[in-house]
Image: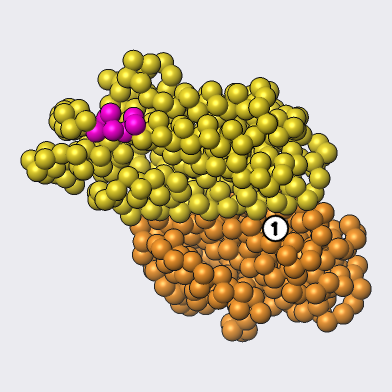
Chain colours: A yellow, B orange
Amino acid sequence: MVLEELGAYLSTGCGILSVVHRHALQPAGKLLRPLLLVQSAIAVGGSAYPVLPAALGLELLHVGSLVHDDIVDGDTERRGRPAVHQRFGTDRAIVGADALFFQPFALLAACRQRGVPDERIVTATGLLAEAGEQLSQGVMLELDQAGTLPATPSEYFQMAGLKTSPLLSGACRIGAVLAGASQASTASLGRYGHALGLAFQARDDLLPYDTPHERAGKPADSDLANRRPTLPVLLGHRLAGAPDRCLLEALLAEGAGDGDARARMDAVLRRTGALDAARKLIEGQVRECHRALSELQPGPAVTELAALADRMEARPAAQTRSPAR
Amino acid sequence: MVLEELGAYLSTGCGILSVVHRHALQPAGKLLRPLLLVQSAIAVGGSAYPVLPAALGLELLHVGSLVHDDIVDGDTERRGRPAVHQRFGTDRAIVGADALFFQPFALLAACRQRGVPDERIVTATGLLAEAGEQLSQGVMLELDQAGTLPATPSEYFQMAGLKTSPLLSGACRIGAVLAGASQASTASLGRYGHALGLAFQARDDLLPYDTPHERAGKPADSDLANRRPTLPVLLGHRLAGAPDRCLLEALLAEGAGDGDARARMDAVLRRTGALDAARKLIEGQVRECHRALSELQPGPAVTELAALADRMEARPAAQTRSPAR
């Protein structure tokens, strides 16, 4: 359904901007944010059709942020294809993504034509803008933390809470608001989305260590090359004895993303139990998701949202259940 | 008034994102876009207070786009200070400006707290998003045209109509809509803003040739260094005989921004009459501005808008009357 709207959106434009957008948006990811928005609307008694433009908008904003992320991280691949800046140059990638930040607001306003009352659209506009701002703050915070280790998991979750959760939490709350939910239900769905975002980011950090090769088109050693203190690394640092701690600090300070550095990092994280500790933290966030959902009326959409949360639990054996990016 | 809102906005944030924003937003430019929004609201019978957050938002969006422009153009100075990417690095400049694209929508939604009806805010949200999209399209078109000469002034105005006019026209229309203007008055103000944008861009292109040294903190030879086919250059190309035409093409293809290239460019544009021809085209757009304003009820705000248009007329003698950037 959202895929159809995406197809219709992509078929309307022409010129280099549309070419850039088509490259950035196709093949589509798993459309997690549109899915959250639509299911949240249904969970509070609404329906999909009136909120679909807003759902598409969330995906555009997300993809725009990935395009800028890839420039900042120097990643050359995304979803198994050349990153936008790799294919079209950094200048066009910057400007092309900018357009993807404006269109979601036009799409949100266009929900008016599908019968959504203006009052709900204005509230949702505030939420969408807030989500975008927090996303920028989170990326900025991550840039500041590069090469340093946050002292605690709670500092880590503060960063992830700004970088990954805003769009997931925002998608849930916007879906709820557009469908006319009560403030209580909107807040519950917001808490669900927030915890889902934390689980998602932690799962994403864990992914390179659960899988021997590249996943989701993102090179497995990008985080290390960008000297990013991921959750497993910071847990390893807390759990390690002095020698391993020194080794971790050296690996992170170097930012060496080659296979040898990766292998040494892998070994430390395994013997310190950091990977298991990370999985436990993810399970805690998944429980948070279920707690938030328990405040809503049960129904098929709530069941679907619960299943999405369960998929964030990272079991080394269940490698086919990777989260969407 | 807008300066006070800007000050209040800047004093609320903390962290590196706010530091970047303070650097980008201070010292403030001449706040042309906020001024247009407020005067347009007053021109149709509204007042300043309810629309001030939206007016501030227009400035944030504009400054965000300048930050990305400076990266794309490789310009190292803006408003007489180091460009944001020069001061904080390209990564922080990309992400910092992204935040400035989201905040205008939050500010627009916040006009609700000042009594603006939701219906008007939703319409204005669509207009703001449209302006941002067109801006991105315009910059993309400019990137495509680098090093080539558009065949006609109308092609030039098509690019400028996407790059410079959207925010000026958008500011006027958003001010009108928020103040509850009729569709006819909103359209008149939109036409005024569009023509003002074309005059503004043409004036900006002409500026380096009217002044011997740097203006508005922008190096005078940035356009040439970026192989940008400005209005004087394209007019010179049309008016020149074969030898000068070759010289112009060579200068543009080289993209040489040094003093010698500038001097040779100056000489060709003077002897072909291109600078006078550019001034004539600007005068035509200023007349368009007055025509559009004549469709409105006369009053102090309309008089103010008319005076703004007159200031775009570029007379070599009146060098103190440069347009705001």
Q: Is residue B241 magenta?
A: no
Kindly identify the residue that appears in the image at 71 percent across and 34 percent down. A44
Please say if A250 is above or below B227.
above
> Taking B260 as reference, is B117 left or right?
right
Q: Position of residue B160 (x, y in %)?
A: 65, 56
- At label 1, counting other C-alpha atoms closer than 10 Å, the crowd grade (few under 14, some 14-19, many 20 or more) is many
Q: Nearer the viewer, residue A247 or A14?
A: A247
Front residue of B148 and B128: B128
Residue A13 in sight in this render: no
Q: Is residue B82 above or below residue A162?
A: below
Whether A275 is among the magenta residues is: yes
Q: Quadrant of residue B314?
A: bottom right
Which quarter of the picture shows residue A110?
A: top right
Q: Which residues are magenta?
A: A274-280
Left or right, B207 with respect to B118, comes to left
Q: Is residue B221 left or right of residue B153?
A: left
Q: Mark 1: which secondary structure?
A: helix
Say which amino acid is labelled 1.
Answer: Ala
- Estimate the x, y position of residue B281 in percent, counting from the top left: 71, 65
**In the rendered image, the vertical position of residue B215 relative to residue A286, given as above or below:** below
Question: Residue tagged by mark 1?
Answer: B109
Asked whether residue A214 is in view, the answer is: yes
Q: Residue furthest left?
A: A243
Chain letter of disc 1 in the image: B
Q: Quadrant of the C terminus of chain B?
A: bottom right
Seen at 50% across and 73% down, the residue is B11
Q: Position of residue A229 (x, y in %)?
A: 28, 43
Residues B4 and B167: in front is B4
Q: Main secondary structure of the magenta part?
A: helix
